[in-house]
Image: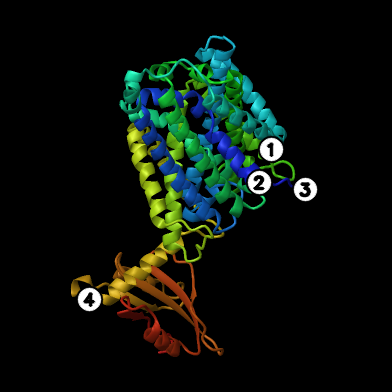
């Protein structure tokens, strides 16, 4: 059997994450955002985006260190917490978001590539160049995940050199002394804050590229928290430094209007070009590595067609899923507009991140066996969830309504398929917690006659023996009462605990109880069955055939 090549923290999580974070948005849109919004608004955009990114990264780290994380990354975590219908809905949304991310990065690459060589930057030229590069990136991924990972090390070096070139540059485009203060504090010139936020937000979703590699990691419990948090922190520091540097050293009008501004202010422009091309290609590689693995995981859980679950080789490469990723990415490239794709990606990721934060809070609240080695306070996860939902509404209300409608329809479709995890999910803990709280309230509250409900013990034998009696019990219990039906089986052995059977009605609880005699069994059950606050108050039985 061939040896499976697994990756560590640096190669499997940090590298794809940081290269996706420091990608197309940093090079091609951050200067424009600083020019349009000014320093303080730009810092606000960066900080709000990173509040979502950091809280989600901490929630991911907490979930990842609780149980074994298998292939599927974020999808696997949500589905094992909130169940397959919700997990599947958000997993497919995340897959589509990552697939569109590929086109986002390749459109950015095409813009820079065509502009540098003097070609006309039109939507058709972007489509042509983007399609050619997409085929090349897909081919690399199709051949080997390991090859795709190794190419990213060289790209990381190019990005570092490009940042050095930007910070070390000497140029004549300094802000005018009289307007330096305005450059820092002047509010947005034309574009709304939330529009700029939507364009920027995909920059902070890069850690998803590392999390999605969970099935290819040697030690996901250690690598995902360490690699993700390191990448988020490094990306935050770089973005803050760049925003301050651009604002203090470059004329604001140039930042807002000139797409070649980084080449004009850098020490060695060729290094910046290498960084731009390397970052956009590496980001595309990171997304195209992660997206098929999520689709493959959903297919393994019978959420998407089984065709996509098939893998190749010892490492189970998801080549069938890669083909669908290619088609979605190509659709994005045909749209051909970087800003439109950025907003589409933002909606998908913010939705998923909101529910990922809820999953972590949900587990902490409901699951008795949730004991992560990396503990994240519940308020952190709730803060991230609230921030996501507020930003969703503010970002694009109509798009949010559309996303809710689509995801809601997908959820109810999956719900009707009655998909159930063999390992269970956190909902059992929710009902247990609610039942416990309800029993405590019922026990402490004084019972009033207006709240009386029939709680019936029915001894009717097998259903086939007295079907009329079962119907009578249902009628008496109604919709608000409880009906516990017992089939007593005389046995010479000592009585054992009742065996719960599948119920055919939400108001009937059927049990089989071995007992020494019919009357002894009725006496035992009548004395001990029930809980404080919901004790049986009615007994229903049939006439004995022997009487």
> What residue is disc 2 on?
216
Give how far across and how far down residue 307 sits, in percent. 63, 40
Q: Say above or below: 386 vs 457.
A: above
N-terminal label among 1 and 2: 1
Nearest to viewer (mark 4 / mark 2):
2
Give left or right: position of 299 versus 245. Answer: right
> What residue is disc 1 on?
145
The front one of 279 and 85 is 279
Give how far across and how far down residue 256 sits, in percent. 40, 19
Mark 4: which secondary structure? loop
Cα distance between the residues tagged 3 and 1? 14 Å
Q: Which mark is residue 447?
A: 4
N-terminal label among 3 and 4: 3
Res. 452 visible in picture:
yes
Give left or right: position of 178 versus 21. Answer: left
N-terminal label among 4 and 1: 1
């Amino acid at each position: 059997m061939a040896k499976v090549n697994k990756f560590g923290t640096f190669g499997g999580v940090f590298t794809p994450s940081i290269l996706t974070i420091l990608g197309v948005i940093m090079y091609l849109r951050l200067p424009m955002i600083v020019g349009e919004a000014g320093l303080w608004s730009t810092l606000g955009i960066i900080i709000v985006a990173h509040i979502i990114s950091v809280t989600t990264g901490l929630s991911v780290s907490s979930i990842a260190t609780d149980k074994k994380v298998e292939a599927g990354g974020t999808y696997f975590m949500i589905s094992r917490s909130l169940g397959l219908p919700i997990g599947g809905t958000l997993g497919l949304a995340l897959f589509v978001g990552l697939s569109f991310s590929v086109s986002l990065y390749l459109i950015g690459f095409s813009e820079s590539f065509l502009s540098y060589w003097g070609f006309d930057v039109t939507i058709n030229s972007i489509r042509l160049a983007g399609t050619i590069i997409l085929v090349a990136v897909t081919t690399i991924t199709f051949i080997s995940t390991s090859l795709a990972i190794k190419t990213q090390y060289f790209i990381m070096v190019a990005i570092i050199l490009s940042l050095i070139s930007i910070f070390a540059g000497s140029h004549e485009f300094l802000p005018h002394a009289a307007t330096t203060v305005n450059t820092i504090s002047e509010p947005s010139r034309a574009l709304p804050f939330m529009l700029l936020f939507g364009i920027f937000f995909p920059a902070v979703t890069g850690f998803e590229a590392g999390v999605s590699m969970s099935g290819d990691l040697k030690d996901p419990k250690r690598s995902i928290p360490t690699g993700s948090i390191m990448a988020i922190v490094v990306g935050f520091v770089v973005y803050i430094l760049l925003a301050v540097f651009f604002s203090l050293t470059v004329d604001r009008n140039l930042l807002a209007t000139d797409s070649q501004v980084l080449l004009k202010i850098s020490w060695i422009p060729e290094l910046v070009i290498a960084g731009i091309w390397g970052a956009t290609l590496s980001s595309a590689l990171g997304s195209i590595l992660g997206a098929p693995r999520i689709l493959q995981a959903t297919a393994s859980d019978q959420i998407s067609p089984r065709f996509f679950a098939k893998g190749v080789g010892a490492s189970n490469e998801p080549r069938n899923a890669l083909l669908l990723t290619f088609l979605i990415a190509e659709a994005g490239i045909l749209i051909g507009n970087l800003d439109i794709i950025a907003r589409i990606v933002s909606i998908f990721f913010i939705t998923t991140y909101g529910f990922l934060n809820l999953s972590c809070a949900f587990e902490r609240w409901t699951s008795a066996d949730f004991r992560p080695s990396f503990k994240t306070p519940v308020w952190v996860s709730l803060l991230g969830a609230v921030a996501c939902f507020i930003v969703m509404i503010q970002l694009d209300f109509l798009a949010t309504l559309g996303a809710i409608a689509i995801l809601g329809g997908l959820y109810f479709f999956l719900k009707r398929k009655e998909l159930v995890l063999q390992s269970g999910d956190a909902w059992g803990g929710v009902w247990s917690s609610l039942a416990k709280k309800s029993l405590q309230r019922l026990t402490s509250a004084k019972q009033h006659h207006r709240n009386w409900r029939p709680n019936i013990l029915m001894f009717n034998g097998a259903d086939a023996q007295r079907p009329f009696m079962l119907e009578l019990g249902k009628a008496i219990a109604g919709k608000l009462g409880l009906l516990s039906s017992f089939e007593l089986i005389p046995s010479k052995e000592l009585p054992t605990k009742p065996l719960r059977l599948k119920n055919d009605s939400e108001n009937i609880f059927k049990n089989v109880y071995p007992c020494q005699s019919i009357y002894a069994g009725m006496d035992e059950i009548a004395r001990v069955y029930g809980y404080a606050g919901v004790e049986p108050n009615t007994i229903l039985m049939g006439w004995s055939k022997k009487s």
